[in-house]
Amino acid sequence: MKYVKVFIKILLVVFVFNINSFFSNHLETSANSNNYEANIIISSEMIDVDDSFTVEFIFGENIIDYYYVESGVTVIDSSDDSNYVLFELTALDGECQFELFTSFVDDVYQINTIYTFSTEGMFFISDASEDTACLNALEYLVEQGLMTVAEVQDEYSFYIQK
């Protein structure tokens, strides 16, 4: 029985060591991926719903691999080089996203997201957050006299609760 307890303690120590090693390696890889931050250039932050827009992702390092996920955003055209990717995009009504996954080291990918929000025949585009695209749209509605500030506050409260 004594040997079983010693064996279990050894297994526990090995398990904890392996878990700590895994997480420290994972965190180190994640921290290093910050060196590959994208400079994102959006052709326009506000467009007609019938128009397309371009988004260019420029990196300081060479890209090994990339892929993207369209969620209400459609790629019309794309081009790439060793350190940049350029997309021409269109979006559907509502809230949409375009996610670019890029790899610089092995199979470690980082994500950059473009958000769109549509209202009154216009698209609002942001690389900061979905909220930013929505707030820009609501600001536009106030500027155009289509909503009051109180209505915008109500609309935004509804938006953030969903």
Image (cartoon, grey):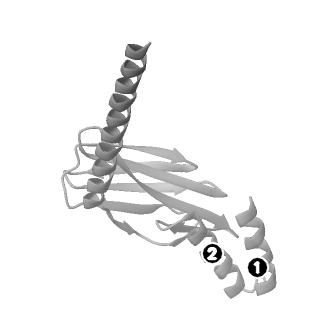
Residue in view at x 76 percent, y 81 percent: 146
Is 79 left, or right, of 97 in this rendering? left
Q: Amino acid at mark 2?
A: Leu
Q: Amino acid at mark 1?
A: Gln
Residue 141 versus residue 56 in the image, above or below = below
Is 51 left, or right, of 66 in this rendering? right
Residue 132 versus residue 91 in the image, above or below = below
Task: Give the mark count.
Answer: 2
Q: Nearer the viewer, residue 51 or 155?
A: 155
Q: Nearer the viewer, residue 12 or 54?
A: 12
Residue in view at x 32 percent, y 36 percent: 17
Q: Is residue 73 visible?
A: yes
Q: Is residue 148 visible?
A: no
Do tag 1 and tag 2 residues touch (Cβ < 8 Å)?
no
**Residue 18: % across, % down:** 33, 33
**Residue 106: % across, % down:** 23, 39
Between discs 1 and 2, the one toward the N terminus: 2
Q: Where is mark 2, residue-wise?
A: 135
Residue extending furthest toward the top? 1
Q: Which mark is residue 137?
A: none
Q: Residues within 10 Å of mark 1 (few under 14, many from 20)?
A: few
Q: Residues within 10 Å of mark 2 (few under 14, many from 20)?
A: some
**Residue 78: % across, % down:** 35, 50
Is 135 left, or right, of 45 in this rendering? right
Q: Nearer the viewer, residue 50 or 43?
A: 43
Residue in view at x 40 percent, y 28 percent: 12
Residue 50 versus residue 72 in the image, above or below = below
**Residue 134: % across, % down:** 63, 69
Q: Is disc 2 placed on a helix, strand or loop?
A: helix
Q: Where is mark 1, residue-wise?
A: 153
Q: Which quadrant would residue 116 be assigned to in this image?
A: bottom right
| Real-space Cα separation, disc 1 to disc 2, in angstroms | 10 Å
